[in-house]
Amino acid sequence: MVGSHMADYILDNTDWDVIGMYRWRSPLDNISHLVPRVNRNDRVSLIYGDLRDSTSVNNVIKDVRPDFVFHLAAQSFPKTSFISPEDTLDTNVQGTFRVLEALREFAPEAIVHVCASS
């Protein structure tokens, strides 16, 4: 949800390209209005990656070599965190670690914003 608003803001207020990372099962409802731009390669693209998979995170960062990273991904539902605490830890903490490590190796000059609401 937050990523779709960030993409809209960047597209409306900068000349930057937006590259979103998504998982195979990620719903595209929040960015359905951007899908035509993705299909036209009009400053928006999507690339597969999963925060729980170091190889895919490394591949994304290595392929994209971003200048700016807005890390907005997390498991954010409290009830889910109590039901699946290890999955939440892996996604939120280890996932952030994987992103930062990939950036350190493949895009060390990138400016990173890590968003958290709680």
Image (spheres, helix red, strand yellow):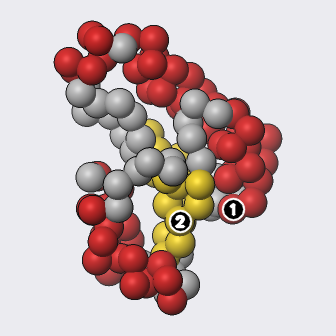
The answer to whether residue 111 is visible is no
Furthest residue toward left? 79
Tell me the tag on residue 64: 1
Crowding at mark 1 (Cα within 10 Å: few <14, some 14-19, many 20+)? few
Looking at this view, is 84 or 90 the one in front? 84
SS at mark 2 in the image:
strand
Of the numbered discs 2 and 1, the one sitting upstream in the chain is 2
**Which residue does the numbered mark 2 point to in the structure image?**
46
Residue 104 is drawn in which quadrant? top right
Q: In the displayed structure, would residue 49 be above or below residue 44?
A: above
Looking at this view, is 51 or 15 the one in front? 51
The amino acid marked with disc number 2 is Leu
Name which residue lies at 22% across and 20% down.
Answer: 78
Furthest residue toward front? 25
> How far apart are labels 2 and 1 at the CA level?
11 Å
At which x and y percent is residue 86? 45, 11
SS at mark 1 in the image:
helix
Name which residue lies at 66% across and 43% down.
Answer: 57
At which x and y percent is residue 9? 31, 70
At which x and y percent is residue 67? 62, 61
Looking at this view, is 16 or 38 the one in front? 38
Residue 85 is drawn in which quadrant? top left
Residue 95 is drawn in which quadrant? top right
Q: Looking at the rendering, in which quadrant would you find the C terminus?
A: top left
The amino acid marked with disc number 1 is Val
At which x and y percent is residue 28? 35, 61
Name which residue lies at 54% across and 84% down.
Answer: 41
Q: In the displayed structure, would residue 71 be above or below residue 6?
A: above
The answer to whether residue 4 is visible is yes
